[in-house]
Image: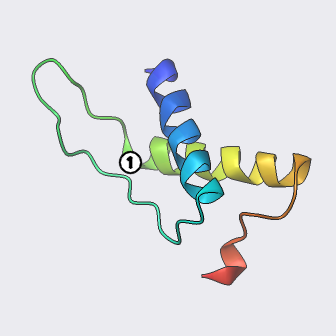
Amino acid sequence: MLSRLDEVCQEAESAIEQNYSFIVLSDRGVSDSRMSLSSLLSCSSVHHHLTKKTTQNENRYCGRNW
């Protein structure tokens, strides 16, 4: 589960770098062999990952621009 959260965070970061305006976190594709991640856990993980990256790098992610 933690490795998948890391992948989701990396995918979100990549989308920001490609100048996407919106990121949609979805549980589409859930099946017997693929579990669903908690939406709260996923959203908060992506938020903290992008906020941490913003602190370390330039200001590319900022909730105020929405």
Residue named by callout 1: 39
In-image side of 52 versus 20 (left or right): right
At x 71%, y 64%, the residue is 61
- Residue 24, picture quadrant: bottom left
Please state the horizontal and vertical placement of residue 21, each as a whole percent of the image: 53, 72
Q: Secondary structure at mark 1?
A: helix
Above or below, comparing residue 16 to residue 1 in the picture: below
Residue at 37 percent of width and 40 percent of height: 38
**Residue at (87% x, 58% y) in the render:** 58
Nearer the observer, 60 or 33:
60
Residue at the limit of the structure toward the left, as seen here = 32
Q: Position of residue 35 (x, y in %)?
A: 24, 26
* Label 1 environment density (alpha carbons within 10 Å; few <14, some 14–19, many ≥20): few
Q: Residue at x 53, y 66 (%)?
A: 20
**Residue 34 location, x and y as percent?**
21, 24
- Report the amino acid beneath label 1: Ser
Quarter of the image for the C terminus: give it: bottom right
Left or right: residue 55 versus residue 47 is: right
